[in-house]
Amino acid sequence: YEQAKALTFKDYGEPPNVLSLHGHSIPPPHGEHMTIRFLASPINPADINQIQGVYPSKPTFTTALGTVNPIAVAGNEGVAEVIALGDKAKAEGFKKGDWVIMKGPGFGTWRTHASATPADVVKLEDEVREGITPIQAGTVSVNPCTAYRMLRDFTPLKEGEWFIQNGANSGVGRAAIQLGKAWGLKSINVIRARDEKSQEEKLRQDLKSIGADVVITDAELQAQGIRDMSKEWTNGGREPIRLALNCVNGKAATAMAKLLAGSSHFVTYGAMSKQPLTIPASMLIFKDIHFDGFWVSKWADRNPEAKKKTVEDVLWLMRKGDFKDVPLDEIMWEWETKGEDLIAKVKDTLEGYREGKGIFVF
Ligand code: NDP
């Protein structure tokens, strides 16, 4: 039997109130079952929303982990190693030591070990995994894939053309900067202003160092004269801004849409400010701006092969050194680590203006 611990919840609510560390054991795997050991699992905003009960994809509540009442394991993304497996799983091409990522949301990745079947996971082939760290493999399938598809699937951007995005220092935003750079695109990146100007400057330089062409604050975006500045950046407006990626909403998002060329696409993928998105009718009628939404989970469900290919492509860029890790706060999860310490770290991620995204490392 394999001993396991998991961060679980039985009711929806604020993570510090509902999460608890649950210990259980996993029987030796038979048939198509595999025992997997997690290596790295990030704390994404969607994980928090899922625990709060406000995320459309729901976790699986089960009594299979030895509780009287059904519980769910938190976390949606991560990478794990196969440590034992049944004959049927072997026949499907899995072996001990393989690395697997989750096929979709809802599996529960904030745990040391789990029982999984081939239907739950995607294997990273040995050549795909070469030179890749657990942290890279554990964070490749949500944020980089989201940025990748949004840059590719809404409007064909030619080399030298521009996109604009807010939430530019988010995981998705940093991925978009780096993918854009690798593909010869130029980017205008909106961040939230910092009270501490030296912090703001540090962030600007940080984003420029990974390939951002222009970095402005949300206040600068909404100030007078932004149109003239935008013209300056884009060669007198001769290099059109054809795509906007919206992580935030609110007034600053509307200001971003105003910089788009006619018939461009404005893709919303996040809701960080919790404000609605307001669109002047003239943008739809006269400027023919297309307002789209994107959800990587639904896209991956519909396009499993393309998802695999996208992941492999990003891992290849990482291996080449063209794609740097986002700043991370590595949370070591040892066997002795107390539940309250892990839960305190989850709570930290609810606050904004962070230095890095939390990730459990086992
Ligand atoms: P990160 O945790 O890496 O970053 C969070 C970002 O949100 C930071 O840029 C932060 O800026 C900003 N932020 C936090 N609070 C606010 C606020 N009140 N107003 C404005 N900005 C704020 O996030 P991810 O990259 O993992 O995710 C970003 C968003 O994208 C989330 O909403 C997430 O759910 C969504 N997402 C959607 C996907 C999809 O398929 N649709 C896939 C992946 C992510 P600051 O540093 O200034 O605090």
Image: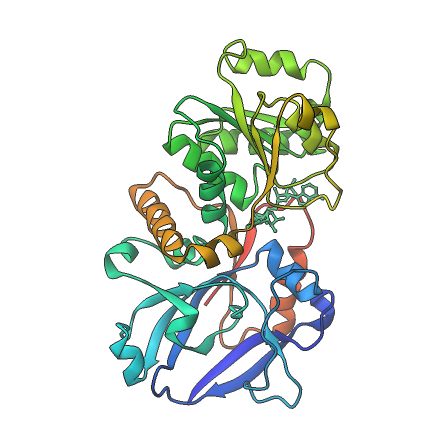
Residue 132 quadrant? bottom left
Q: Is residue 212 above or below residue 119?
A: above
Counting every numbered tag in the picture gives 0
Q: Is 256 on the left-hand or right-hand side of 79?
A: right
Q: Is residue 187 above or below residue 140?
A: above
Q: Residue at x 66, y 17 (%)?
A: 226
Q: Is residue 195 visible?
A: yes
Estimate the x, y position of residue 106 in percent, counting from the top left.
55, 67
Q: Is residue 193 visible?
A: no
Q: How is the image coloured?
A: rainbow
Which quadrant of the figure contains the N terminus? bottom left
Q: Is residue 102 above or below residue 190?
A: below
Q: Residue at x 59, y 23 (%)?
A: 260
Residue 26 quadrant? bottom left
Query: Residue placed farthest to the top in the image?
Result: 236
* Pick the front one: 74 or 61: 61
Q: Residue at x 49, y 24 (%)?
A: 162
* Pick the front one: 42 or 65: 65
* Pick the front one: 220 or 283: 283
Q: Is residue 114 above or below residue 156?
A: below
Estimate the x, y position of residue 188 in percent, counting from the top left.
55, 26
Q: Is 313 on the left-hand or right-hand side of 352?
A: left
Estimate the x, y position of residue 306 in percent, counting from the top left.
38, 51
* Pick the front one: 279 or 247: 279
Residue 93 quadrant? bottom left
Estimate the x, y position of residue 32 in percent, counting from the top left.
35, 82
Q: Residue at x 71, y 75 (%)?
A: 11
Which quadrant of the figure contains the C terminus? bottom left
